[in-house]
Amino acid sequence: KKPSEHQTEKILTGIQQIGRELSEINLIYKR
């Protein structure tokens, strides 16, 4: 059993969400 694979998937999706939020914040601040 490898719980690490599931964990990495969760971490990657979390990083993607954070990246989207950061890009949105950057767009707001650049205006």
Image (cartoon, rainbow, N blue to C red):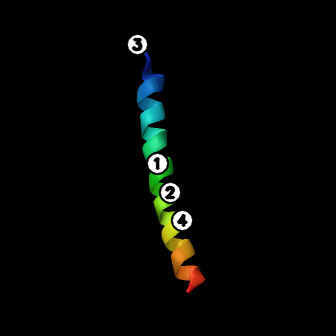
The answer to whether residue 3 is above or below residue 7 is above
Residue visible at 41% across and 29% down?
6
Residue visible at 44% across and 55% down?
17
User: What number is the disc on residue 22?
Assistant: 4
Q: Secondary structure at mark 4?
A: helix
Mark 3 sits on what residue?
1
Q: Disc 1 marks which amino acid?
A: Gly
Q: Position of residue 13 (x, y in %)?
A: 43, 45
C-alpha distance separating marks 4 and 1: 12 Å
Camera-near label (1 vs 3) is: 1
Residue visible at 46% across and 61% down?
20
Q: Disc 2 marks which amino acid?
A: Ile
Residue visible at 43% across and 22% down?
3
N-terminal-most mark, 4 or 1? 1
The answer to whether residue 3 is above or below residue 28 is above
Mark 2: give few (<14), some (14-19) or many (20+) Cα within 10 Å: few
Mark 2 sits on what residue?
18
Q: Secondary structure at mark 1?
A: helix
Circle 4/circle 2 CB separation < 8 Å: yes
Mark 1 sits on what residue?
14
C-alpha distance separating marks 1 and 3: 23 Å
C-alpha distance separating marks 2 and 1: 6 Å
Q: Secondary structure at mark 3?
A: loop
N-terminal-most mark, 3 or 2? 3
